[in-house]
Each structure stands twice: as C-alpha cells, then as structure tokens.
Image (cartoon, rainbow, N blue to C red):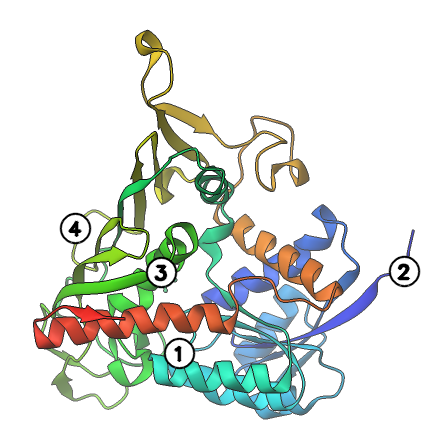
C-alpha cells in the first residue's frame, strides 16, 4: 500500500458544524482512496473543559483556546473555520497569510464586502480554499446538476427553491449568545438570507448560472428579543423571512422563499427546475430521491419517476454500500472533504471556492438591498 501524506487539521470551533466536519475527516479515508491521510491534530474553543471533551470524543491530539495559536502552528496544514460568521474573516485572512489551506463554513462572511476581503486574501496568498455548502454533494443533488449539464432538461424556464424552518416563532427565543447567534445581526450578518437562502443560491448558481436581477421582500415578525449577551430587550435586526424572484442570465425565472416561521417545517429545503424537455424536483426530507419527468417518454407511460439515487453508477454511491442502500446528511460532508482532498493532492481547488461563495454573498446583498429599497436590483 502506498504511503499516504499526512494532512494535519486545526479545527476552530466545537459546535454542530465542527462535529459534521470532524466526522467527515474521520470517515473519508475508509471510503475514498486518497493521497492524503487527514490527522485531527488540534481543536480550538474558548471553553477549555468543553474543548477537551470534544477532543476526547472526536480523537483530536491537542486542544487550544486561542485560534491564533492554531493558525501560527507550523504543524497545521489545514485550518477549518466552524465558528459564528463574525469570526470568519479575521481567522481566514490570518490563516491565508500563514499559508494554510482553508475550509470555511457557510456563509463565507456577513456580507459581500467582507467576503471579498477574504477572497482577495486567499488568492493573494495562493492557498487552497473551500466553502462548505454541503448540499451540493448529496448524490441526488449532484445527479440533478449532471442531468442539467447533459442538456436533459433542454432550455430552462423556471427555477424555484424553498428553505423552511420553524424554530424562532416563539418571542421567548433570545438573540445572540452561544446557541442563538444566528438571530443577532452583528454576529450573523443577516437572518434567513445568509443562513438558509445562501444554500439555495449556491446550488442555483451552480446548476443554472448567474442571476442578473432581483426583486425581494423580507419581514421581521418578532421585533424585539432579549439578548443572551446583555440580558436587555433589544430590536431584532435580522430578516425572519425572505421571498424573492429573479432573472437568470440564461433567460429563466427564479422564485425563492425562506422563513423560520413555517410551523411544522424543521429544514425543508426543496428545489424544482422546469425545462423544455424535462423537469426535476428534490426535497431534503427525502434526500436520496430525485423526481424526474421526461416529456420524451412514450405517452402511455409518461409521468414523474422517483429515482432512488443509491446505485453504483450514480454520484458518489460506488464508495458506499451495495446498490439500493441509501446514505444521508452526514455523507455530504464526507463527499466534500473527499473532493477537497482529491483536488488538493493535485494542487487544485475544489468548488465552491471563496470566490464562488463571494458571488453567493453578492446575491444575498442584492436581495437585502431590494427588500430595503422596495425596488429591483441588478447585479
Ligand atoms: C440553521 O438552523 C441551519 O443549521 C443552517 O445554519 C445550516 O446551514 C442548514 O444546513 C440547517 O439549518
């Protein structure tokens, strides 16, 4: 067996996303034949006891409480940024200057200006960079992209996507703090636009090309919340819900909605694309299935097919079990790490890069501007 090159990982953060990424690094080498062997070297968090517990449970060799120690550590090859959005830029820019490879959680930054400074820093330093828009690598979503690229849908007329949740309906949910920073504009940048629609936009730009014009509407249903940081009741500055429609450069029309006020929906991410010859639909709650309708089918059997994306010739599936046995959410992180490491071994970037994610941030900014001004915004 060829010796693999060790790749030492410095994980900044120890929350939900740090778990998803650590799990991916632990499993990837068992399922993908890669030139690199990831080593969970250091995990960093401000609470030492909690970070130590995380290190023990995920197998990190050491613990740090200051991210600067990780970035400066000459033994670290790859810095993983899994902390709230307001910390992304400072860490990423320092990591780029220190010559590290970087994987950053989505959204890249709180707004496009911040995303651009990060993009310029990694490009200037010439370091490999990647943003974790993980849903691209759910096999059914990757298959949808392949069908579009092969021209199976023909000319695209409509692109629609939703991301619906219901966890902030109660006015008692605070803003800020460790668990609810997504409701605090200073930390998150925006509400559902940066957190949820960014996923839909990343996939839409990848599948259907650039967006040229946007018309958006946002709402903040709960106007004041207690701050988990200060204990005071403060105005809420994030968007609780956002609906926008848009034009794509290829002439198709887009229709997007996201909210944290859709009672009954926990993480309902769906998209549907209608083309001249065929249509496709996907739903995160049934993530291994792709719905496909092909108008070229013989009339008497024409109808929506529900493709169970679990066979060896479908994206990523030859790496897993036997045909017919499905995989889930966590595997999208394993796939992105596999693609990142495969490209890194050739000195190349996997997608989406910081520059790709900057384009997503530009769209998010245009959405928020359109909602504020009550006007169309061109990109
Ligand atoms: C918010 O609840 C959240 O965790 C997002 O931050 C993630 O990006 C999304 O995948 C699931 O929902």
Label 2 vs 3, first from the N-terminus: 2
What residue is shown with label 1?
A: 109
- In the picture, the disc for residue 5 is none
Residue at (84, 61) in percent of width and height? 4
Percent x, y for residue 364?
28, 70
Q: Badge 2: how crowded within 10 Å, few (<14), some, or many (20+)?
A: few
In this view, the mark in front (4 or 3):
3
User: Distance from label 1 to label 4 (Cα)?
Assistant: 28 Å
- In the picture, the disc for residue 210 is 3
Percent x, y for residue 370?
15, 72
Residue at (62, 91) in percent of width and height? 97
**Which corner quadrant of the image does residue 228 belong to?**
bottom left
User: Distance from label 3 to label 1 (Cα)?
Assistant: 20 Å
In this view, the mark in front (1 or 4):
1
Residue at (60, 62) in percent of width and height? 350
Query: Looking at the picture, does residue 234 appear above or below residue 101?
Result: below
- In the picture, the disc for residue 263 is 4
Front residue of 75 and 297: 297
Query: Looking at the picture, does residue 209 appear above or below residue 372?
Result: above
User: Distance from label 1 to label 2 (Cα)?
Assistant: 37 Å
The answer to whether marks 3 and 1 mark residues whose Cβ atoms lie closer than 8 Å is no
Quarter of the picture holding the C terminus:
bottom left
User: Distance from label 2 to label 3 (Cα)?
Assistant: 42 Å
Query: Looking at the picture, does residue 308 appear above or below residue 302?
Result: below
What residue is shown with label 2?
A: 3
User: Distance from label 2 to label 4 (Cα)?
Assistant: 52 Å
In this view, the mark in front (2 or 4):
2
Point out the residue furthest to the top here. 300
């Amino acid at each position: 067996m060829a010796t693999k090159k060790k790749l030492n990982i410095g994980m900044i953060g120890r929350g939900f996303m740090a778990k998803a990424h650590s799990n991916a690094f632990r499993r990837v080498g068992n399922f993908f034949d890669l030139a690199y062997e990831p080593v969970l070297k250091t995990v960093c968090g401000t609470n030492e006891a909690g970070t130590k517990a995380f290190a023990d449970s995920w197998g990190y060799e050491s613990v740090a409480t200051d991210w600067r120690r990780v970035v400066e550590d000459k033994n670290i090859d790859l810095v993983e940024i899994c902390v709230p959005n307001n910390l992304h830029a400072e860490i990423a820019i320092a990591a780029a200057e220190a010559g590290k490879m970087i994987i950053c959680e989505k959204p890249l930054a709180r707004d496009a200006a911040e995303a651009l400074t990060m993009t310029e820093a990694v490009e200037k330093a010439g370091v490999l960079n990647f943003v974790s828009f993980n849903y691209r690598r759910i096999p059914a979503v990757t298959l949808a992209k392949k069908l579009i690229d092969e021209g199976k849908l023909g000319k695209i007329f409509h692109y629609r996507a939703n991301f619906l949740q219901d966890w902030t309906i109660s006015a008692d949910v605070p803003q800020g703090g460790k668990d609810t920073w997504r409701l605090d504009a200073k930390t998150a940048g925006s509400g559902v636009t940066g957190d949820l629609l960014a996923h839909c936009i990343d996939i839409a730009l990848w599948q259907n090309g650039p967006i040229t014009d946007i018309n958006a509407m946002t709402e903040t249903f709960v106007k004041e919340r207690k701050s988990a940081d200060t204990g005071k009741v403060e105005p809420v500055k994030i968007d609780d819900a956002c609906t926008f429609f848009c034009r794509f450069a290829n002439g198709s029309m887009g229709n997007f909605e996201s909210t944290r006020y859709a009672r009954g929906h926990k993480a309902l991410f769906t998209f549907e694309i209608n083309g001249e010859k065929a249509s496709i639909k996907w739903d995160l709650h049934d993530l291994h299935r792709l719905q496909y309708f092909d108008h070229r089918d013989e009339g008497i059997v024409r109808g929506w097919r529900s493709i169970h994306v679990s066979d060896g010739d479908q994206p990523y599936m030859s790496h897993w079990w036997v045909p017919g046995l499905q995989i889930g959410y966590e595997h999208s992180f394993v796939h992105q790490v596999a693609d990142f490491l495969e490209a890194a071994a050739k000195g190349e970037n996997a997608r989406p890069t910081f520059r790709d994610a900057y384009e997503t941030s530009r769209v998010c900014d245009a959405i928020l501007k359109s909602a504020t001004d009550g006007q169309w915004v061109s990109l």
